[in-house]
C-alpha cells in the first residue's frame, strides 16, 4: 500500500507512482508483490482513512510525509501498528528524512525512514523484506531500529540519470484512476541554495533532466486522460530554453483535446524575458491567469544571509512590468521574518513594491522546515518558533529572530494586513498612491498608521478575524487572504466602508480636497469579488457625484478633471483628459468580469475562501473597468 495524504482530493500521487513503477520493473520485487496506491485529502475523516487502510491487510505500507500532514500520518501509523503489528511501514519525504530519532522514538523494528530519493531505497527495502535472510543494512539511505540500536545506512547516491526511473504515466501505473490535478517533473534539482528551502540544499544545486521525448509523452497522457489541472513540479520552470517548447506543447494539447484547463508552476528566478514569454503563451492559451513572482525579501542583508543574493531583484521588477503592460495578473511573494529583516526594512520593501505597481503582494509566515540549512541555524540567527495548533500539520512558525522581537513580528503582520486590505484589496488604492506621490505620507507609513488604527478599532468582524489569526497562528493558513477578501469585498463590505471612512476622516491630511476625492473614488472602485449587483456605498459623497447605475454592475460617476487625471496616472483610466482641467468628467465604473463566480451562501466559509484566495492571486482580472462615459467633459456650471 502506497499512501499519500495531499492537501486536496484527486491529486495525482506522483511520488508513489515512481516507487511502484520502479518496483514493478525489478523482476524479483515485481513478481513477489502486488501494489495499490491510495490518496486521501488531509481533510478526510481520519477514522475512515484508518478503517480503509487497516482493511487492506497489506504487508507493507509506505507514507509520503510533509509538514502539512505529519501529525495525521503519525496518528495513522500508531493506530495501524496496533491493528497490523506484523506489517512493515516505510516513511519518506522531506519531513522525516534524517529525523529517524524523532519519528522512530519508540524504537519500533518494523518502521523505517527513507533518507533521500525514495525510488532506490524503497525497491531495495522490498527486496530485502522478501528475502528469508534479509539484511536491512544493505538498503542504502535507510534508518531503522535493530537490536536496540538505531541504524542509519550509507546514503543512496543521487540518481544521475532520471531515465532509470520508469514513467508511471507510460507504464500503466496511473491507468484506471481518476485524478483532477496532475503533477509532472521535467527535472530534479535547483541551482540556488536559499537556506529556507529544501529544494537546492537537498540536491547540491545540480539540475538533472528527464528526456524531452518522455516529457511530451507524459503531457499527452495528462491531456488525453482529461486532468483538469497540471502542476509542473520543477523548482524553476523556464530555466531551460526547452521549457518554452514544452509550454507550447501543453497549449497545443489543450486546443486539441480540451485539457488541461489550468497550469501552475514555480517560475525561474533569473530569466525574466523567457518567463514573460512562457506566461504569455499560457495566458493566451487560457491555461494561466496569473504569474507568481517569488521575491521573498527586498532587504540586501537578508538576501545575503539566506544565500539568495544571486537572484537579482531587478529581474523580478522587469518581469512584473512586462506582465502589467500585457495586462497579465501577477503577485509578489514575500516571507516574514527572514534572518536580517527588520520591521523597518520590511516596511520599506512594501513601500517599494507598491511604488512599482505590484498587482498583489502575498506575505507567508516563515516556517522552520526540516532538512533546510536554516534548520541548523536556529541559534545562530536567534530563531524562535511556535507550533501551529493542529492535529494534522506539524508546522513551526518563526515568531522572533535576532532582528525582530515577538511584538515587532506581530506588528509587521498587522502592517501587512493593513496593506492587504487597503492596497491589495484596493480599499485605499487611489488615495494611498496620491499621498505617497505627493510626499504627504509614504505607503509604508500609511500602512503602519492603518495597522495601528485597526488594532484599536473594536466592533469589526473583519478586524477580529485578523486579530484571531495572529493570536492563534492561523495566519499560517494560505486561505486567510481569501477569507479577508470574501468579507471586505462582499459579505462585510458596508462594515469595512465604515471602518475606512472613520480612519481617513481622523487624519490630518483629510483637509486636502484631492485626498477626499481619491477616497470617494476608492469607495466606488473597490472590486466586487463575486458576480453580484453593485450598490452605492452608505456614505455622504461631497467631492464626486454618483449619478446612479448604468446597469446592475456599473456606476455612473461625475468627477473633477484633476481626479480623472489621477485615475489615468494610476493606470485605472485609459483616456486623455488633459483638455478638461477646468471642467468635470463623467465616467463609468464597470464592475462586470466574466471570471467571477456568484456568491454561494450555502457553501462553507472554507469553500468560498478557497475561491476568493484564487481570485486574490489573479486580482487584475476582477478590477473594474473605468472609462469616460461621454466623449466630452462635463463643464462646471457657471454662476448666474
Image (cartoon, rainbow, N blue to C red):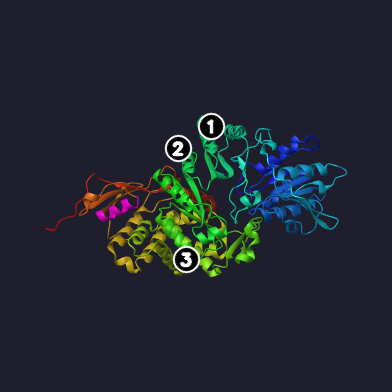
Q: Is residue 289 magenta?
A: no
> Do the residues under discs 3 and 1 have CB atoms within 8 angstroms?
no
Which label number is shown at residue 253? Answer: 1
State the SS at label 3.
helix
Which label number is shown at residue 284? Answer: 2
**Residue 313: image x %, image y %?**
48, 53
**Residue 245: image x %, image y %?**
52, 35
State the SS at label 1.
helix
> Do the residues under discs 3 and 2 have CB atoms within 8 angstroms?
no
> In the rendered image of this protein, does residue 82 appear above or below residue 239?
below
Q: Which residue is at 79% across, 59% downward?
A: 106
Mark 3 lies on residue: 344
**Residue 626: image x %, image y %?**
33, 48
Q: Is residue 570 magenta?
A: yes
Q: Nearer the viewer, residue 375 or 218?
A: 375
Q: Which residue is at 59% across, 48% downward?
A: 191
Amino acid at each position: 500500500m502506497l499512501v499519500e495524504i495531499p492537501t486536496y482530493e484527486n491529486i495525482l500521487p506522483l511520488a508513489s507512482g515512481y516507487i511502484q513503477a520502479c518496483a514493478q520493473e525489478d523482476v524479483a520485487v515485481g513478481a513477489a508483490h502486488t501494489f495499490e496506491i491510495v490518496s486521501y485529502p488531509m481533510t478526510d475523516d481520519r477514522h475512515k482513512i484508518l478503517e480503509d487502510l487497516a482493511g487492506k491487510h497489506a504487508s507493507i505500507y509506505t507514507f509520503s510525509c510533509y509538514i502539512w500532514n505529519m501529525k495525521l500520518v503519525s496518528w495513522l501509523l500508531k493506530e495501524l501498528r496496533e491493528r497490523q503489528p506484523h506489517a512493515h511501514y516505510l516513511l519518506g519525504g522531506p519531513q522525516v528524512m534524517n529525523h529517524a530519532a524523532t519519528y522512530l522514538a519508540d524504537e519500533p523494528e518494523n518502521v523505517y525512514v527513507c533518507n533521500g530519493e525514495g525510488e532506490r531505497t524503497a525497491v531495495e527495502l522490498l527486496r530485502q523484506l522478501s528475502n528469508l535472510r534479509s539484511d536491512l543494512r544493505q538498503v542504502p539511505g535507510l534508518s531503522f531500529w535493530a537490536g536496540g540500536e538505531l541504524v542509519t545506512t550509507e546514503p543512496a547516491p543521487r540518481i544521475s540519470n532520471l531515465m532509470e526511473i520508469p514513467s508511471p504515466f507510460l507504464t500503466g501505473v496511473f491507468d484506471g484512476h481518476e485524478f483532477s490535478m496532475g503533477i509532472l517533473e521535467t527535472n530534479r534539482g535547483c541551482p540556488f541554495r536559499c537556506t529556507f528551502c529544501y529544494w537546492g540544499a537537498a540536491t547540491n544545486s545540480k539540475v538533472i533532466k528527464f528526456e524531452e521525448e518522455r516529457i511530451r509523452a507524459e503531457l499527452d497522457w495528462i491531456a488525453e486522460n482529461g486532468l483538469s489541472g497540471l502542476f509542473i513540479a520543477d523548482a524553476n520552470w523556464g530555466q531551460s530554453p526547452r521549457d518554452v517548447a514544452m509550454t507550447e506543447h501543453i497549449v497545443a494539447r489543450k486546443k486539441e483535446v480540451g485539457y488541461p484547463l489550468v497550469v501552475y508552476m514555480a517560475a525561474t528566478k533569473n530569466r525574466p524575458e523567457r518567463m514573460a514569454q512562457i506566461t504569455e503563451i499560457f495566458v493566451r492559451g487560457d491555461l494561466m491567469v496569473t504569474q507568481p513572482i517569488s521575491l521573498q525579501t527586498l532587504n540586501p542583508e537578508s538576501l545575503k544571509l539566506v544565500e539568495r543574493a544571486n537572484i537579482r531583484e531587478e529581474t523580478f521588477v522587469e518581469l512584473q512590468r512586462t506582465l502589467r503592460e500585457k495586462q497579465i495578473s501577477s503577485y509578489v511573494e514575500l516571507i516574514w521574518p527572514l534572518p536580517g529583516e527588520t520591521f523597518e526594512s520590511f516596511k520599506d520593501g512594501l513601500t517599494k513594491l507598491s511604488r512599482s505597481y505590484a498587482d498583489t503582494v502575498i506575505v507567508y509566515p516563515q516556517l522552520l522546515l526540516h532538512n533546510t540549512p536554516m534548520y541548523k541555524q536556529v541559534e545562530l540567527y536567534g530563531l524562535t518558533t511556535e507550533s501551529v495548533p493542529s492535529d494534522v500539520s506539524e508546522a513551526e512558525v518563526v515568531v522572533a529572530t535576532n532582528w525582530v522581537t515577538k511584538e515587532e513580528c506581530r506588528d509587521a503582520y498587522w502592517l501587512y494586513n493593513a496593506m492587504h486590505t487597503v492596497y491589495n484589496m484596493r480599499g485605499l488604492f487611489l488615495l494611498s498612491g496620491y499621498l505617497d506621490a505627493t510626499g504627504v505620507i509614504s505607503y509604508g507609513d500609511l500602512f503602519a498608521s492603518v495597522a495601528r488604527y485597526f488594532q484599536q478599532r473594536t466592533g469589526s468582524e473583519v478586524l477580529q478575524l485578523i486579530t484571531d489569526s495572529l493570536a492563534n497562528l492561523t495566519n499560517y493558513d494560505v486561505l486567510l487572504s481569501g477569507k479577508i477578501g470574501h468579507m471586505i469585498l462582499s459579505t462585510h463590505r458596508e462594515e469595512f466602508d465604515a471602518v475606512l471612512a472613520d480612519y481617513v476622516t481622523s487624519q490630518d491630511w483629510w483637509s486636502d480636497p484631492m485626498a477626499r476625492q481619491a477616497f470617494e473614488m476608492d469607495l466606488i472602485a473597490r472590486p466586487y469579488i463575486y458576480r453580484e449587483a453593485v450598490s452605492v456605498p452608505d456614505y455622504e459623497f461631497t467631492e464626486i457625484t454618483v449619478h446612479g447605475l448604468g446597469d446592475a454592475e456599473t456606476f455612473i460617476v461625475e468627477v473633477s478633471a484633476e481626479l480623472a487625471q489621477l485615475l489615468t496616472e494610476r493606470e485605472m483610466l485609459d483616456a486623455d483628459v488633459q483638455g478638461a482641467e477646468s471642467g468635470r468628467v463623467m465616467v463609468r465604473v464597470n464592475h462586470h468580469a466574466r471570471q467571477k463566480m456568484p456568491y454561494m451562501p450555502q457553501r462553507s466559509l472554507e469553500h468560498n475562501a478557497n475561491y476568493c484566495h484564487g481570485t486574490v492571486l489573479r486580482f487584475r482580472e476582477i478590477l473594474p473597468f473605468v472609462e469616460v462615459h461621454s466623449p466630452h467633459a462635463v463643464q462646471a456650471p457657471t454662476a448666474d
